[in-house]
Amino acid sequence: MKRYTLLSLAGLLILALAIGIGTALASPEPAPVCQASVLHPNFILLDADGVNVLESNGAVSTMQTCGQCHDTNFIQSHAFHSDLGLSDYEETKDLSSSNGLFGKWDPLTYRYLSQNGDERLDLSTAEWLILNGERVVGGGPATTSRNGALLITLNADTENPETVILNEDGTSSVWDWEKSGTMEMNCFLCHLETPNTAARAEAIHTGDFGNANTATLTDMNIVSKTTDGWAWNTEAFNEGGELKSELLAIQDPTNANCATCHGEVHPNAGDPLTINQCDLDYPQTATTGQVVSGQRINQSGVNLTNKEELDRSWDVHAERQLECTDCHYALNNPSHLSEIQSDNPDHLIYDPRSLEIGEYLERPDHNFARGESAQFTVAPEYKATMRRCENCHDANESHTDWLPYTDTHMESVACETCHIPQMYAPAIQTYDWTVVTARGGASTECRGVEGTPNQVTSLVSGYEPVLLNRTNIDGNTLLAPYNLITSFYWVYDDANGSKRPVRLTDLEAAFLDHGNYANDIVAVFDSNSDRKISSAELILDLPAKEAAVKAKLTALGLNNPRIEGMVQPYSINHNVAKGENAVNDCKACHNEGSRMTQSIKLTDHAPVTPVFDAENNVSGSGEFVTDQNGALYYQPVPAKDGLYVFGASRVGWIDWFGALIFAGSLLGVLGHGTLRYFSARKQPKTHGKTERIYMYEPYRRFWHWLQTASIVILLLTGLIIHRPDIFGAFSFPGMVIIHNVIAVILVLNAVFSLFYHLVTARIQEFIPHPYGFFDDAIIQAKYYISGIFKGEGHPFEKLPTSRMNPIQKMTYFMILNVLLPLQIITGALMWAVQIFPNIAGGLPLLAPFHSLVAWLFGTFILVHVYMTTTGATPLEAMRAMVTGYEEVEIHEKQG
Amino acid sequence: MTKKRFPLWTIGLIGILLLILVPVLYFLPSAQSKNDPAAYIPTKPVHVDHKDIVKGDFKTGQDVTRACLECHEETATEFMKTTHWTWESKAFDVPWRDEDVTIGKINQINNFCISSQGNEKTCMNCHAGYGWDEGPESALASEENVDCLACHADVGIYSKGTFGNPAEGTNLLAAAQSVRVPTRDNCGKCHFDGGGGNGVKHGDLDESLYFPDQSLDVHMGGEVNMQCVDCHWTENHQVLGRMLADNYTIDPQEQVSCEQCHVDQKHEDERLNTHLSAVACQTCHIPTIALEDPTKTYWDWSKSGDEGREDDHFTYLKIKGEFTYDKNFAPTYLWFNGDNEYRYLLGDPLGKDGITYINKPAGNIQDKRAKIFPFKVHIANQPYDVKNNYLLAPVTSGENGYWTTFDWNNAFELSEKKMGLPYSGEYGFTETYMYWPTTHMVQSADQALQCDACHGENGRLDWAALGYVGDPIEWGGRK
């Protein structure tokens, strides 16, 4: 039987396709705009009892109507848009009872879905639907109770938050689900080009849930409302009782369909884009500033700073004609086979046993591929199923020619971090429900706009997202852009010991008296004595204010009212800019004041220090910082997440320690040199005869100077990489490349030199002889401390076969066996971090070590150069290293 | 001896420097040298002020030319070989004629004022030659008739009157002393006002380009202020660039192209570059035409001569008929390989489907040379000979011309005498199409078309008409 349906469906499709193509080929006229309608056959509209609405004059049932061909029960049970957290619902003493819109505590919308047995009723299921129904697709909590029974079958119970509704006077009465009906999953909402969302919203707001779906079809010459039901226009139906498809073209969801619930979407047509700013009716835009439009920003109608220069589009993907569904596709849609089959065993490139298009159309999975956003926590099992940047783009291909360490960047930085450099729409900053406005709203702050949002005189500046570390499903961590929204609200412990937010109605009772602020509230809040509470006064900035509100809440019978504050990260993944408009200046991050450590304002005033919301995949390891005006900022500390960024990160004490050693040596050398200078004037050097000796053969001189040049360049480039803020003139990536190339030269030079010293046995010169070593070293040290000032001769003769005194031997022994290998190894490991990110502790350990050794090298060079001046004449040793010949003291042979 | 001159250490020093510099330079990303398009603009000769050079008492234009030729001896001979003088193309072998043909204003017609033949009195104020009152043969024969001033004199001083001669009362000495390299003003005099007024013919050339803003044309506008000859490179008075309508095929060597200055210059965006094989630069960089001043898109000659209607420059003139002007509109897009597929020649039969093409650009989706190109289409309803089934060329100007008598029959009989185009005595009006490639009023990248201008549901391209199966964003481009 099923097989037969399927076959006929497929046949129907082929026929429709054939007719479609045939007509398209036959007629020279342009094809109809909405091509999907060609494919979708005409269909009968059925009511909930399965009767043609033309006979019953009833409301249309989408489950029945669409269920004629599609498995609507399958679709509904595989749709988190329908479920909205109902299946995750669990009564709790904490705030959130589910992971979705139905039950998850949202301090922005504030109204709280009451749980069974709560002391005070806030949102009953019916009122939840009235308030949120505009953005509820239907099915799930709109038809089904928390225990799985249909809402319509529930017994009226004044204690059950599913069968009551809160009245304005604070009492509650029974909600009659029979009368209101429930809201089936509304296929039309997403599968019509222009569903009548206004009429639908009106039905929902009046509690007429059962008619909401039918209202979606009004004003299309199909159906109109009568006093007692629906009047179906027989003209809209053909002889077979089927609705004419030209009146109701079923189509794939467009961006506009998604926009109905999610946020601002604008086609790149001629009319300039305007934005409903910080308006929770457009939640995605309100919470992050994301606007899905291909229009050039400077052609939009937004009053933006530097607008003329913004010739990039709002979103490059929208500009390039991508649809929401291209990335957020139905998970079993065979058009997205490559994604579906990405879990194939490695040896299997293609598995032909995939769904046929007909099977898919019967049972399209309406769990859509989704990302890993911080606040959409519903259906966590589908996180990271969507097509992400790297599924379409080969970042290596486009970055390797200019971005050093491409893999390292890609492994620790999300594409969005650079490709969404700035938001150009305002976003919510703060929702403060510790106070309430006269209209019953929160005191709010909006970031990215100067002045009141949504006024033509307000200048929109947009904002730079804060970069936070996100942990993906696969365990990888990435730096990604976020908006942070801070909310403050009162909670209390109810009779069951459950923590609940203070109801809006209680809050209003505390603050307001017949729509105006109560006198005692005015007395406390009115600081300028004008008997009004301005928005500036409406904050809990004084203990007296907080105490007054608390007292009133307590008087209302609320147990232990207290303020909580929460900082919630909102993911930013849209509004992508193409490369030329992305962050592509290395120093944006690799510098003092790096983008990565850039703070973001949380609120002008915080009644309490908020906590960073832990119920998501974002690390809140940063710090809360208050400025002198009392504004609260969030300061990311990437180092706490194990991130080390050249040029931006540094370990303070190492630099201090290194600099101290260097400076100490410099002082020592200067002091020693000055003493030598004066003593030499007082007491000219009386050393014995000197002789010109061929001291250094060419290879020695060659490797010495090559190493000198390498080390000096490495120190300088290293310093620039370490502190690009001081050396702004140099190209950061250029310095990195030079540093790496020279490092290789240094290592090669060291290897060749080692080989030379080994095969010529000259290595012996560098090895201190243990016998009498300390005696000799003390003699040499005495010479430097006193003899040298008295004009004495060098205690040890410098010979071509033995050119070093004991102290030199020891020093070089340390340099060559400890310092140089350490620096080479840490350097090499830092390079290897590209392949093995956490090798030897990763950059956070390696990089500071490398800079410490660099300080020591710098110190060595300083002392080394000074020491060369202690030869027969100050410049003699240096000259020798150039020409090979040195005048050295001849020690008289004893006896 | 050599050892002294080059001590060993200097060799070592050089070796060390090389060992460091060579690898570093090899690994440093080479700065990509961008071709600077401005470098390709020809340098003009240093201006020689002719104030003190040109002397004499000039009574006629020919007097001036004689004076010019005293120093610039070869110039008239050179100039007389150019189409600016001959008004006639080289000979073409066209498939629908047995003999080779030439095309130009001198011998063919268009769908604006139709024909210059017989109308020399007014038409020739755009010919760079004098003496058309003596008849075409005589006018074109003499070197002295070359009008140097039309292109070289300050247009504020010099202007032309009837029969190609200087306007009455022109101070020819002052004009001759003002000569310099031609500016936009000189070229604009004829090319901005072709067809009898500002912006009539071209949708992309009109008087708004005398003082253009950068937003009108990225090359000529604002401080860039490029002149016509910066792109229309000129050698021995041969100006680069050919009028499509006055030719049959055009050798790419003879045509101006964006690439002559924008050498190997591509978009940063790879996706845009994939368009280059099928889309001309003009298509995206000239989103709309006639940006400031309107251009004529329709001309109905049949409505002319109506005594009762009031004249209005943009809608109706008794002498010319009814018009439509349009402004700031999207051009028409066709595959175009630079040639005409057809050019109406005097005596050709009318088109079979009721539309006669004065010219029809060549190219289709299979033609690898062709790219999608923007055109201004000018549609006219113009007279034809009902019995002979060809377009007629009325004599309009002059004493007995149509503009005086408003008698069509008389105008066609006159033209039979002057041009030898037999008139059967019965005329009608028929629709004709003429295509004008759009290549000026170029916009900068930030004003160029975006994806959705062509792709998606409301795109401006008719993919089926262009020969595509569907939007190439989904169906792929031509193979």
Image (tube, coloured by chain):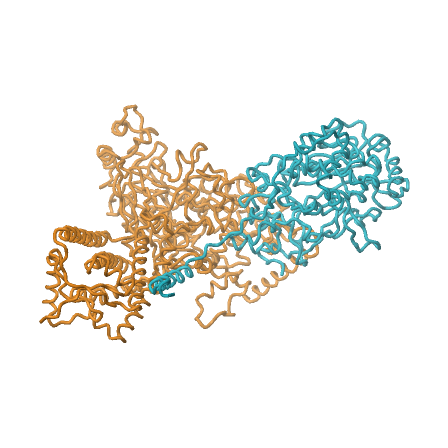
In this view, the residue farthest toward the right is B424
Q: Is residue A364 above or below residue A116?
A: below
Horizontal side of residue A412 vs A357, given as left or right:
left
Q: Is residue A334 above or below residue A672?
A: below
Left or right: residue A655 versus residue A238 is left
Q: How many marks?
A: 0
- Of the 4 image quadrants, the one containing the C terminus of chain A is bottom left
Q: Is A591 left or right of B361, judged from the image as shown?
A: left
B333 vs A863: above or below:
above
Q: Nearer the viewer, residue A628 or A682?
A: A682
Estimate the x, y position of residue A328 in percent, counting from the top left.
47, 55
Compared across the picture, whether B287 is left or right of A163 comes to right
The residue lying toward the viewer, choosing from A627 and A873, is A873
Compared with A289, A3 (above or below) is: below
Q: Quadrant of residue A887?
A: bottom left
Q: Quadrant of the N terminus of chain A?
A: bottom right
Chain shown cyan: that is: B
Q: Residue furthest top?
A: A530
Relative image position of residue A876 (x, y in whole percent): 23, 60
Give the residue at x 64% y 56%. Answer: B468
Residue B271, how many percent across, how many down? 53, 54
- Let me know if residue A827 appears in the view: yes
Residue A77 seen in render: no
Q: Position of residue B218 (x, y in %)?
A: 57, 42
Which chain corresponds to the colour orange?
Answer: A
- Residue nearer the viewer, A133 or B312: B312
